[in-house]
Amino acid sequence: MYNGGKIIFGLIIFLAIVTFPFYSNLGGSAKKAMPSLDTPEIYALATKECVRSGEYMKKEHMKVLDEWRDEVVREGKREKISVGGTELEKSLQNGCMHCHSNKEQFCTECHKYAGIDPYCWDCHFDRGEGRL
Amino acid sequence: MSINRRKFLKIAGLTGLGLSLSARDFILMSPAEASGGHSLPSSGERLGMAIDVRKLTDADYARIADACHTVHNVPTLIPEKNNVKNEVKWIWTDTYNHTFPEQINDYHPEALRNKTFPLLCNHCDKPPCVRVCPTKATFRAKNGMIVQDPHRCIGCRFCMAGCPYGSRSFNWVDPRPYIPKRNPDFPTRTIGVVEKCTFCPERLARGQQPACVEVSNGAMIFGNLADSHSEIRNILSTHFTLRRKPTLGTMPSVFYIIGGEDYAG
Amino acid sequence: MLDKALHGGKTYWTLIIVLASIAGAGTLAYLYQFNNGLGVTGMSRDVSWGFYISQFTFLVGVAASAVMLVIPYYLHDYKKFGKIVILGEFLAVASVTMCMLFIFVDMGQPMRILNVILHPTPNSILFWDATVLNGYLFLNIVIGWTTLHAEKKQAPPPSWVKPLIYLSIPWAVSIHTVTAFLYAGIPGRHFWLTAIMAARFLASAFAGGPALLIILALILRKYTKFDPGREPIQAVGKIVTYAMCANVFFILLEVFTAFYSNIPGHMHSFEYLFVGIEGHGKLVPLMWISVIFAVISLIMLIPPKIRNKESNLIKACVLVFISLWIDKGFGLVIGGFVPNHFGTVTEYWPTLIETVITLGVWAIGFLTLTILYKVAISVREELGTVKSEY
């Protein structure tokens, strides 16, 4: 093969780089994510329910947030929603996190497991965080 | 923002028509608009504000700015050394000459020349910031509010070049360390996006007045310009008011009552 | 053909390594800016665009100037430009690349750059600018590469390139017109709000771009076997002369309108740039250098006797380039922001980080240019057509 040595050397480097995520995580095991619903606000609800089914929210909560964001910010549709007998704003910070006041145990728990860092938190924050 | 293919194609198709449409707008423009009048709809909602500066003192302004900036988590970047360039502000004050540079007059009453005026986004009827934004991150809502969507802003700062009122601030640095006490009901902003006065849609939705209006002791009047029976229309029709830089054709929705109508004949 | 860029002498590799190092330093500086925000630059609430956007504006002009070679060669069949037209096209490629990088490094949220395509906004000039710049980059890559490839095969270029070449002519005008519209359509920025902004941009582009091209061609002649020929260089020199005259004329028109009308807003920016306002005058020395260089360059360019001597022409071209770089790559953008909307002065000066990033982008541009020129010259060296007959 013309320049065979160089090509094989190059291929080895390439493979070493693309497989980095696999061997760098080798041997480690991730603890299963267990988001907690244990907050006083959730216990206070007349019926323990979310804006959609738990199953749906687990997979698609980002879609709900995306829709709300556009409705509220861009279309000015700020009517409240009723969750478990409580009237709440269509809002991550003032709606979702009203009940889910445990950001670390609820949001971060799964996000960490999935290895993602949503930029929601660059602006929005745990309602508790603000009370300095 | 979920944008489906159909919508994308629709917009892409309209893109070609863009310039011809703006040309049509121009041709159909009524003389009233051309001369800088406010184009009021016969019905619906057009939010605006009248500020009676005769009733406002520097202490009031400090309280008003503080109310706005606290409730909206606006970072305090001025007092620190060398930080003026990174300043973020939604409402602030300046002198008469800086506020109304088109109406400078050396013989104005001294009281007027020494007076300070509150400055904020004018929520223009023909906003240049909206015209120049490449992503519709800033846009005009039906009720006339100029909305800045920080989720979509790419931080190109074209709107800052476009706004003739210096109403827009950019987050040159991460604002969070500069917010002494966060209001848990409102988000902060992230680094690299533009922000400005919003006319408080989140407060209006709760039946409250904008934060500045609430603490102005009645000197700031907020309301619907499209409703001829509204308080603001009543005030505007009985007082002489000024708007900032009217010759630019932006048609601000913020009106200043500076006094002196007794002499206007 | 790209493999030709992998074989070169010591000078070539030294240049590549130097440029790559500057580009690397620029990249590191950019990472710092990315993590800490645009606050690391000299820009401020009042002067919200700085070095990056002004470099972008200047380089759009350099990119557009390729058309000054394309028109004579392809429309007027001016054969003497045969050897250098590719230099113009590849310079356009490198310049547009730099333009895009400058826009990118100027963004507060660069990760959201695709929002411009996801939410197309025809009323924004920036949307159109992104469109025409991408189109122009594509046109010049395709045209340059295809014609060079045909030259290598010693065959005429494929017939489908011709329409693209003709299209590239109005397209070049469009990129600089649209870029001028970024500024010329903004109410309240009197310095920019001028109907001849696009014309001024084109005039300065057609002076500065070809001036750079002459400098580059003569550098190539010194360090490679390439010879652009005497006559083609003189012809480009004439283009520089006429365009520079038009540019200076246009600027004087602006000065007349501002000062004869005596409208304060129209005069303030000129006053800030050339005499300073209330003791603020960081740009004053630079702007006067620009003026003096422009005048000297015209004295050297207008009389054919002086211009015809190549050593004079290249000096004049260096002066033209520096003069226009200061005027458009610095003064034009900053001048539009000073004084601010309240009549007060906030000055701007780039920070070290900003300067390193700017140099980094220029280095990436010149790296691209070096590689493209290397390919073009190597192809001709093989064919033995590296020297011009004119």
Image (cartoon, rainbow, N blue to C red):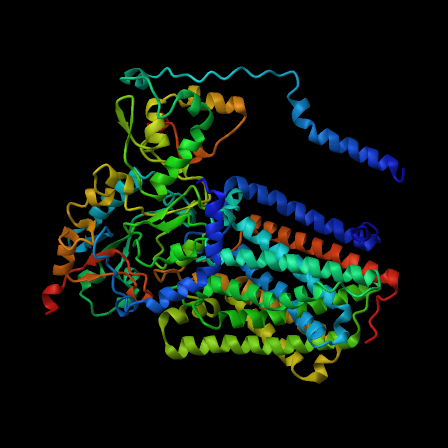
Residue C310 pos. (x, y %): 75, 76
Residue at image location 45% in from the left, 50% down from the top: B135
Q: Is residue B191 left or right of residue B203?
A: right
Q: Is residue B3 above or below residue B97?
A: above
Considering depth in this image, is B153 or C264 the residue closer to the camera?
B153
Q: Is residue C116 left or right of residue B63?
A: right
Residue C223 pos. (x, y %): 81, 62
Instruction: Mark yes or no: residue C269 visible.
Output: yes
Q: Is residue A23 left or right of residue C291?
A: right
- What is the number of callouts on the image? 0
Instruction: Mark yes or no: residue C39 visible.
Output: no
| Quadrant of the image containing the N terminus of chain C | bottom right
Which residue extends farthest right?
Answer: A1
Residue C283 pos. (x, y %): 50, 63
| Quadrant of the image containing the C terminus of chain C | bottom right
Residue at image location 61% in from the left, 76% down from the top: C243
Considering depth in this image, is C256 or C87 the residue closer to the camera?
C87
Q: Is residue B135 above or below residue B242?
A: above
Determine which quarter of the picture holds residue B40: bottom left
Considering depth in this image, is C306 or C132 the residue closer to the camera?
C132
Residue at image location 64% in from the left, 21% down from the top: A25
Q: Is residue B120 above or below residue B29?
A: above
Q: Is residue B259 left or right of residue B84?
A: left
